[in-house]
Image (cartoon, helix red, strand yellow):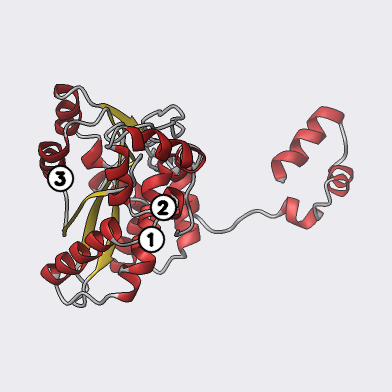
Amino acid sequence: MKASVEHIRSEYAFTERRACRLLLVPVSSYRYKPRRNDDGLRERLVALAREKPRFGYRRLHVLLEREGRQVNHKRVHRVYREAGLALRRKKRKHCVRTSAPLGIYTEPNQEWALDFVHDVTASGRSIRVLNVIDAYTRESLAMEVDTSFAGLRVTRVLDQIIAERGLPRAIRCDNGPELTSRHFLAWALDRKIDLIHIQPGKPTQNGYVESFNGKLREECLRVSWFQNLFEARRILANWRHDYNERRPHSSLNYLTPAEFSAKTSRGKDADSVRLENAHRVSHFPTAAAAS
């Protein structure tokens, strides 16, 4: 505020009292001269910053307290900034992804959707579930359970599915490190599989697998207690079999994914099933609620 008062006085030749009255600044506050000398604190902060160039003002404040200096952290922050010691934070770079809405699917293996779900065991150990589904038949192609996944492990699971079903035309996934690694990109390029990475923060662009994840959480993860990793694998394998073989799916006219897949592979029946379910299968972009 003092700088504003000085600017008005120099610009319009106002008196000191008139400028303070205009800016609602008490004259006593404007005339106040700080008695505290920060030279010693500034010198010590600069010396500490040279020793620890990547420390911020909070860590430097802790170092000052260890030396026996009782100084308020707000004062340390003010002197820290005045001395030009503030660190420059590098802006995090994000991949620029174009919008990739869900397409119209007419046959199996046209597009697979891939995502991870997290949970914990009774001992507090974190586990991850790699879910892979077919966007057309809604079949769960894999539910791999482990404590962590690297790009090599993901491609190994996908290779196992490909050996049974054949190559997909495209795979839709998010921008996780294992799905944007050089190994994963090279794997897809070598097999001529299109990778559709959704935009960051837009899970609805991968709506089919998000819908599947919601069913998995509601019907299995929230009602199960995993003693260890091996029990989690057993329970999730049983749930996946029940999902594919026994659970009616509303978007498939209450057929199971296995029944729908079998009908669409029978030539004549395939056309009738596609027409019967076209409005559900082709135009179901979010699929947020459990069927």
Q: Residues within 10 Å of mark 2 (few under 14, many from 20)?
A: some
> Mark 1 sits on what residue?
215
Please state which of the two labelled residues, at mark 3 or mark 2, is closer to the viewer: 2
Helix, strand or loop at disc 3?
Answer: loop
Q: Position of residue 241 (x, y in %)?
A: 22, 60
Q: Are marks 1 and 2 in contact (CB under 8 Å)?
A: yes
Which residue is painted at 24% across and 59% down in the image?
A: 240
| Residue closest to the eye, 165 or 92 | 165
N-terminal label among 3 and 2 = 3
Task: Tell me if residue 227 comes above or below residue 5 in the rendering.
Answer: below
Dot 1 amino acid type: Lys
Decide if residue 112 is on the left or right side of residue 127.
right
| Residue closest to the eye, 246 or 190 | 246
Dot 3 amino acid type: Ala
Dot 2 amino acid type: Ser
Q: Please identify the quarter of the rendering in which residue 11 is found.
A: top right
Cα gap from disc 3 to disc 1, whole angstroms:
25 Å
Q: Which mark is residue 211?
A: 2
Q: Position of residue 79 (x, y in %)?
A: 47, 50
> Mark 3 sits on what residue?
150
Decide if residue 22 is on the left or right side of residue 237.
right
Cα gap from disc 3 to disc 2, whole angstroms:
24 Å
Q: Can residue 125 be seen?
A: yes
Q: Position of residue 265 (x, y in %)?
A: 27, 37
